[in-house]
């Protein structure tokens, strides 16, 4: 299962909550918590997509915290793929606009209780499509870099 690893910082000590120690990527809005880059592997992405598909079919059984977590993880995975493929920030691909999928997923995560089960499932399915497209671009980039 692909997860965002979280490190709690206190008195210059780091306690890994999940995963391996890697260089911190971003500081979260929660003081003392650093979000770590997702490991972008085919198996991790495939496992996460499977988890999203299962969640989309079992929305009524998900807690609000689980829904929030899924949206935030999907946004993080898309953002990390973009970073890896050097996604350009142009007016058509503006990473900070309200029309951007990463922005939308992060915002939606704060308002999951306002979504109907159907709306949440549709949002998850859209995220899956974006993750799959980003995964394809990432794999093509890797093939080009290797000279395949």
Image: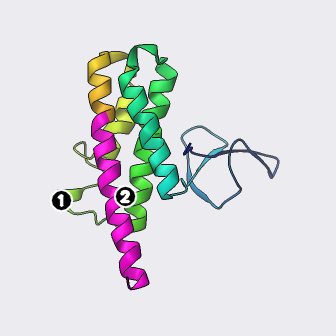
Label 1–label 2 contact, CB within 8 A: no
Q: Position of residue 103 (x, y in %)?
A: 33, 43
> In this orientation, does residue 99 appear?
yes
Q: Which residue is mark 1?
A: 91
137 up-or-down from 73: above or below: below
Main SS of the magenta part reads helix
| The quarter of the displayed image where residue 118 is located | top left
Secondary element under disc 2, as helix, strand or loop, is helix
- Magenta stretch, residue numbers: 125-148
| The quarter of the displayed image where residue 52 is located | top left
> How crowded is the residue under tag 1: few (<14 C-alpha within 10 Å), some, or many (20+)?
few
Secondary element under disc 1, as helix, strand or loop, is helix
Q: Residue at x 68, y 43 (%)?
A: 18
Magenta stretch holds residue 108:
no
Magenta stretch holds residue 126:
yes
Decide which of tag 1 and tag 2 comes sooner along the chain: 1
> How crowded is the residue under tag 2: few (<14 C-alpha within 10 Å), some, or many (20+)?
many
Question: In terms of depth relative to the viewer, which is nearer, 113 or 66?
Answer: 66
Q: Residue at x 51, y 58 (%)?
A: 41
Q: Is residue 58 left or right of residue 120?
A: right
Q: Which residue is mark 2?
A: 135
Callout in the foreground (1, 2)? 2
Q: Residue at x 27, y 39 (%)?
A: 126
Q: Residue at x 22, y 63 (%)?
A: 90
Q: Which residue is farthest bottom?
A: 147
């Amino acid at each position: 299962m692909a997860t965002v690893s979280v490190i709690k910082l206190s008195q210059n000590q780091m306690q890994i909550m999940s995963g391996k120690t890697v260089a911190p990527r971003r500081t979260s809005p929660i003081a003392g918590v650093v979000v770590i880059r997702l490991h972008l592997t085919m198996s991790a992405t495939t496992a996460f997509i499977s988890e999203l598909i299962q969640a989309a079919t079992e929305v009524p059984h998900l807690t609000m915290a689980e829904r929030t977590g899924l949206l935030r993880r999907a946004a993080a995975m898309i953002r990390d793929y973009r970073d890896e493929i050097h996604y350009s920030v142009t007016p058509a691909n503006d990473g900070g606009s309200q029309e951007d999928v990463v922005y939308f997923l992060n915002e939606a995560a704060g308002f999951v209780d306002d979504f109907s089960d159907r709306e949440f499932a549709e949002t998850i399915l859209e995220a899956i499509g974006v993750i799959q497209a980003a995964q394809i671009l990432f794999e093509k980039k890797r093939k080009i870099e290797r000279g395949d």
